[in-house]
Amino acid sequence: DIQMTQDPSSLSASVGDRVTITCRASETINDHLNWYQQRPGKAPKFLMYGASRLHSGVPSRFSGSGSGTDFTLTISSLQPEDFATYYCQQTYISPGTFGQGTKVEVK
Amino acid sequence: VQLQESGPGLVKPLQTLSLTCSVSGESVSSRSYYWSWIRQPAGKGLEWIGRIYGSGTTSYNPSLKSRVTMSLDTSKNQLSLKMTSVTAADTAVYYCARNVLRSFDWLDPWGPGTQVSVSS
């Protein structure tokens, strides 16, 4: 299976901060990379596919980049509802595998 | 589209876990989507279990393939998951999700999840 590694595992930030989360694949996945947001006690919510393509309705403060093995999720100006755990997922080779998650906490 | 998982919250070791996902707003027999199961142990990450297409074709995670069976009940618009010989390691929140497979592949939306504990 392709291993997905996220960095950091957690971070502390304030409302208005710019936040960047990285995701690295153990082998190339082209741009078959999704991002999900999970709030405590809730199901994951789909944010982005194809590394940089925002799902309908997702605020434009979220952006993604990368190709091959290295990817980033950026929140340009953190909002109160963005405190959550974020997961990347590769879907290039089955089984689709997830990163371990990055928890964005209040500073 | 809305999904809702259901099933027994507690299963004994070595027994079979059976879960159902009720779907509204989309037919599970649609040829436009797959339907996936994903699980998440408490405080841990997500693991894709497998998916089923509207025709009944399935694809499973190799790590679970020997113990997992997915099926559709088109009369009830439901999908089901059966996992045999469960152990404590199968304790998790289990989610169902619509799986879009086009040029890219993603899971949206997800059900709220159902907690399954394996214990005697």
Image (tube, coloured by chain):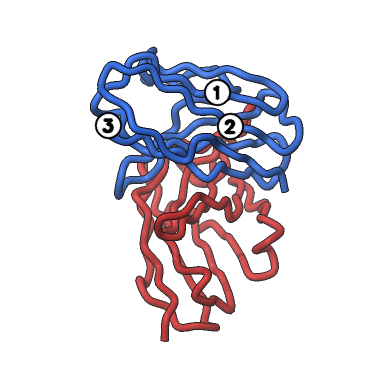
Chain colours: A blue, B red
Front one among A100 and B93: A100
Q: Quadrant of the C terminus of chain A?
A: top left
> Which callout, 2 or 3, points at the residue further toward the start of the chain?
2
Q: Which mark is residue A72?
A: 1
Q: Is residue A22 left or right of residue A94?
A: left
Front one among B96 and A19: A19
> Dot 1 lies on which element?
strand
Asked if marks 3 and 1 touch (Cβ < 8 Å), the reply is no
Q: Which mark is residue A23?
A: 2
> Which callout, 3 or 1, points at the residue further toward the start of the chain?
1
Crowd tier of the residue under label 1, counting other residues whose Cα lies within 10 Å: few below 14, some 14–19, many 20 or above: many
Tell me where residue A56 sits by quadrant: top left
- Which of discs 3 and 1 lies nearer the camera? The answer is 3
Crowd tier of the residue under label 2, counting other residues whose Cα lies within 10 Å: few below 14, some 14–19, many 20 or above: many
Q: Which mark is residue A54?
A: none
> Which callout, 2 or 1, points at the residue further toward the start of the chain?
2
